[in-house]
């Protein structure tokens, strides 16, 4: 399988890259702004580094050559997401996994809802995430959206729990390591159970008023 990682210099993308190189035979296309300054080749036989912008449709189409799956590390720019969708359609690539954020369906409840609303609820970033998710859901892509709760790092902690669209979001935090593991699990799944799904992603046992690191 050939995987295009858009935003490959990000933290989750870096963890995902390491897992895929270690645990699979997948080939990787690592796409990012100033990619050659921010990324170092780890396996010349399986990796390709591409410099480009998410708004550059031609660069995206070139990077999509031979690709089976696209992972987008940030859906905070709606026009960029629409450009990615357009490039994927032109390249006849259907499988898409995108990292979004919690709250795009007003699915967070309780005291955590109040805290989350105060932090990001009315921000331009939240609206962009809502619009980006809608664009993906209205496309004909075989998508999986990941609605991530508040992120932190903890080596070795790959525990995640999932909620479905329409269910209350549960969980105030999750590690980037767990998110990377989830993406690996989704990429390795052959049952199509994740296609057309928008998944709330959190750490089990963190149904709190706010993340522990705030």
Image (cartoon, rainbow, N blue to C red):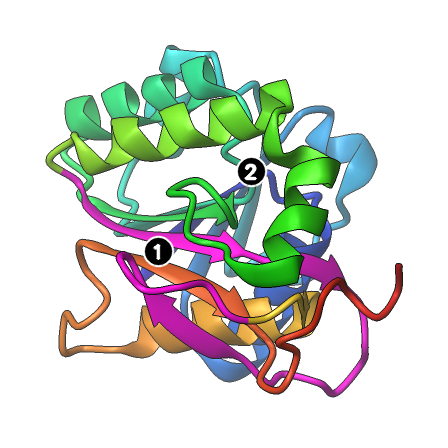
Residue 25 can be seen in this image = no
**Residue 128 percent across, percent down from the top left:** 49, 23
- Magenta stretch containing residue 157, yes or no? yes
Give the position of the N terminus as an image quadrant.
Answer: bottom left
Quadrant of the image for the C terminus? bottom right
Q: Are marks 1 and 2 in contact (CB under 8 Å)?
A: no
Residue 134 in the magenta stretch? The answer is no
Crowd rating for badge 1 (residues with CA inside 10 Å; few <14, some 14–19, many 20+)? some
Q: Is residue 198 above or below residue 72?
A: below
First to last magenta residue range: 141-170
| Mark 1 vs 2, N-terminal side | 1
Q: In this view of the protein, can residue 130 be seen by the observer? A: yes
**Left or right, 92 with reference to 174:** left
Q: CA distance from mark 1 to mark 2?
A: 20 Å
Left or right of residue 164, residue 177 in this image: right
Q: Is residue 143 above or below residue 132?
A: below
Vertical arrangement, residue 146 with respect to residue 189, above or below: above
Mark 1 lies on residue: 2
Q: Residue at x 56, y 18 (%)?
A: 53
Where residue 23 appears, x then y in whole percent? 51, 83
Give residue 74's mark.
2
Between 129 and 85, the residue placed more toward the observer is: 129
Local SS, label 1: strand
Q: Nearer the viewer, residue 139 or 55?
A: 139
Where disc 2 sits, the SS reads loop
């Amino acid at each position: 399988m050939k995987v295009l990682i858009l935003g490959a210099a990000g933290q989750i993308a870096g963890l995902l890259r390491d897992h895929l190189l270690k645990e699979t035979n997948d080939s990787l296309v690592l796409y990012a702004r100033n990619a050659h300054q921010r990324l170092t080749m780890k396996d010349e036989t399986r990796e390709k580094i591409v410099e480009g912008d998410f708004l550059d449709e031609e660069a995206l189409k070139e990077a999509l050559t031979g690709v089976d799956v696209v992972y987008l590390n940030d859906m905070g720019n709606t026009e960029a997401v629409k450009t990615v969708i357009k490039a994927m359609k032109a390249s006849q690539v259907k499988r898409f996994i995108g990292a979004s954020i919690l709250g795009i369906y007003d699915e967070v409840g309780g005291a955590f809802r109040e805290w989350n609303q105060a932090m990001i609820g009315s921000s331009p970033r939240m609206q962009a995430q809502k619009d980006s998710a809608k664009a993906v859901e209205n496309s004909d892509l075989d998508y999986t959206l990941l609605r991530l709760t508040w992120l932190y790092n903890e080596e070795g902690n790959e525990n995640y729990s999932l909620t479905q669209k329409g269910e209350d979001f549960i969980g105030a935090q999750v590690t980037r390591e767990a998110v990377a593991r989830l993406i690996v699990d989704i990429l390795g799944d052959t049952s199509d159970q994740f296609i057309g799904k928008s998944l709330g992603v959190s750490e089990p046992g963190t149904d709190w008023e706010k993340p522990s690191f705030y």
